Image: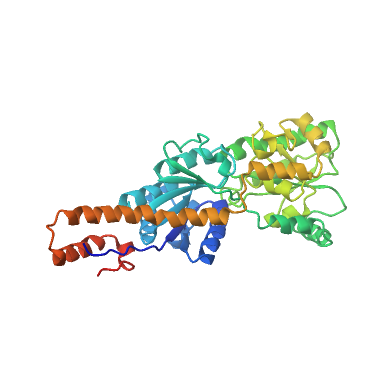
Amino acid sequence: MFPIDFPQSVEVYFVACHPNATSHFKDFTETLKNRGIGCRIIKPEDVAEGRKIHELPEEEFSVLAQRIAKECQPATCVITDVGHSFLVQVQQALKDEYPNITRIAYYDNPEPFVPVYSETAARVMAVANAILFANNRLVDKGIMGTEGKTQIGLGYYPMADVDEIRTLRTSDVRQQKRQEFLAKAGVDDHGQPIMVYFGGANDVYYREAFPHFLKTLELAAEQQDLSTLTIVVQQHPRARTEGNIDGSLVEEWKKSAKKNFPQITLSQGSFSEALIVADSAAYYQTSAAPKFLMMGIPTMQIGHEPYEDVLTRYQLIPSATEAKSFLIGLHSLREPNAECIERVYDQLGINKEWPDVFTQFVQHLPDAKIDQHHRNIIATLIEISVGHQSLCRRLYRMILNKFSSLTASCHIP
């Protein structure tokens, strides 16, 4: 039998719909490129004439998924996020058209359950070969959609801006940033406390959590004068493109605001700017919430019902569902101490060696793929009588040509 030299190259493609996952994938591709591993990020707009996924009708999803699958043909593996139902079709198209490509679903959220997100994630994960969790504490926790799937914990959390913003919050620059931030929001700066409310982007948030937050402010203002408090709503990046529901609710609320109500307005600044100037942070559900504590921001959760996450599960922050608990929480806000921050790190499953974990993970992917090709080829060649090497070589080439991603790097003697 003649020698067969199989390729050891790896090519990792990422398909991103959700903005959080997109930022994670940028970190991943930087890591892989620095280690000589080929990679690429594909977003729907890359193959849809610049139109973003929320701008496309669902009847176009199938054709778009086929286009993305074709773009991924050179890949050893494809990693998609799980934040949009369109990715179910992408995973399925890859499975049907390119079954030799390993398909990974990347669960970027640090929580085991997130309203709306988890239902969508389960559908995407059900089609994938394996699940990659950012939070390695979520592996084998029975999360919906992971039954029977290989699960890998990465230990990743986006930390690039944490130290930078924490430093800026204690620097002389902060006062200038505050003035600029408030000016853009149309708010006069007279030294009042600034609470930044970080909004969401799903039906539960639009229909229940945010309206309840505004109602809680009204009821709390009946019990205590909140006119010295300014609340700036930092909308989720998708919120304005999904009908600006929370923005419209704020404008309606302001029309009926009374003298003792807090001043509330919409942010015109960036997420990072909001983090720098916030005297306190409030939210209902966001995967960014752990960052608030890491950056030293006093934080509280406010919603129509408690949402259990890393911060509330261990009572690291107050959680309010009505006026009384909101006022108690407001007066109990304190900067998080070192022990509190350490607990957050622990519960996020952060592993500082995640680049090594990720690199080793993708480097082992092609072995299974190549071994399968090897078995397919050898099984066929074995059926040929010994001594027909010329025929074997021709047949080997014919079979190998079916695996176009391998042809260029295989040596045929």
Image point (26%, 64%), residue name: 3
- Residue 333 on image: x %, y %: 81, 40
Q: Quadrant of the C terminus?
A: bottom left
| Total tally of numbered discs in the picture | 0
* Side of 277 where 93 appears, left or right: left
Nearest the viewer among 361 and 341 is 361
Compared to residue 212, the image places residue 370 above or below, namely: below
Quadrant of the image for the N terminus? bottom left
Task: Decide which of 90, 239 is in the foreground and name it.
Answer: 90
Q: Residue at x 39, y 43 (%)?
A: 127
Give the left or right position of residue 85, taking residue 394 as reference.
right
Residue 405 is drawn in which quadrant?
bottom left
- Relative to 230, is 11 above or below? below
Q: Is residue 248 left or right of residue 279?
A: left
Counting from the top left corner in percent of width and height, residue 341 is at 73, 45
Q: Where residue 389 sits in the image (x, y, percent)?
A: 16, 65
Hey, which residue is sitting farthest bottom in the picture? 413
Along the horizontal axis of the image, is 169 left or right of 116?
right
